[in-house]
Image: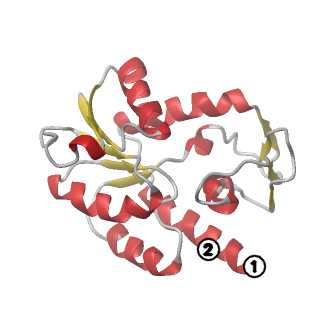
Amino acid sequence: MKKVAVIGARGNMGIRYAMILREYCDVEVVEIDLHNYISCDHTDCDGYIIATPTDEHLNDILLYSQWKKPILCEKPIVKNKDDYYKLVDICITDIDLSMINQYSFLDRGNEGATEYNYFKTGKDGLVWDCINIIGNARKSYDIKKSSLIWSCVLNGDTINFADIDKSYIDNIKAWVNGWRNKGYILQAHSKVLGALNER
């Protein structure tokens, strides 16, 4: 890819992805946000990264899919069962859709337990914030928010917080070069919906 549009470019994740594209992928970035949502010309882009609020993800996927280019969406894509079924409908089409899965670039293939603990959560809530921890867990997982110090163990391997920043870089670079994970999207959302039902 030579040119990628980042939708939601002024948000925290949009800023991150635009910087990665420029500094690590040598890709031209078209920044799209509320100030130029309609007027910005993006039709000649090679792909789209959606970094808008979660509630806008489905509509944005459908909007930008009309240009038949790869789409990488921030996680989670949806947060409830009704929207999950809409996501199922999207995933069975030919839309080239992937979802950010930074933890997959930290997974060493082991089989141990998975644990996460940190008191801060984003707007989507703790469990949805941890969709890729849950999605990549091969065995049991324990997700908490009782610690002032960030800690994460993925399949038995301790993750350092600094590794997270690098994993986002690895994820974007891989997507630009052909990495896709459409099959993982429904699996991860289904596991989180199941976890929420158990709580």
Task: Report the number of discs.
Answer: 2
Which residue is disc 1 drawn over?
198
Residue 92 disc label? none
Q: Secondary structure at mark 2?
A: helix
Amino acid at circle 2: Leu
Q: Secondary structure at mark 1?
A: helix
- Tell me the residue at 77%/76% (across/down): 199
Residue 174 in the image, given as x and y percentages of width and height: 43, 35
- Left or right of 84: which side holds 109? right
Residue 194 in the image, given as x and y percentages of width and height: 66, 76
Front-most of residues 90 and 29? 29
Q: Give the mark nearest the N terminus, 2 or 1.
A: 2
Residue 193 disc label? 2
- Left or right of 16: which side holds 190? right
The residues tagged by marks 2 and 1 sit, at their Cα atoms, a distance apart of 9 Å
- Tell me the residue at 38%/59% (across/down): 57
- Tell me the residue at 70%/39% (across/down): 108
User: Is 65 rendered above or below residue 101?
Assistant: below
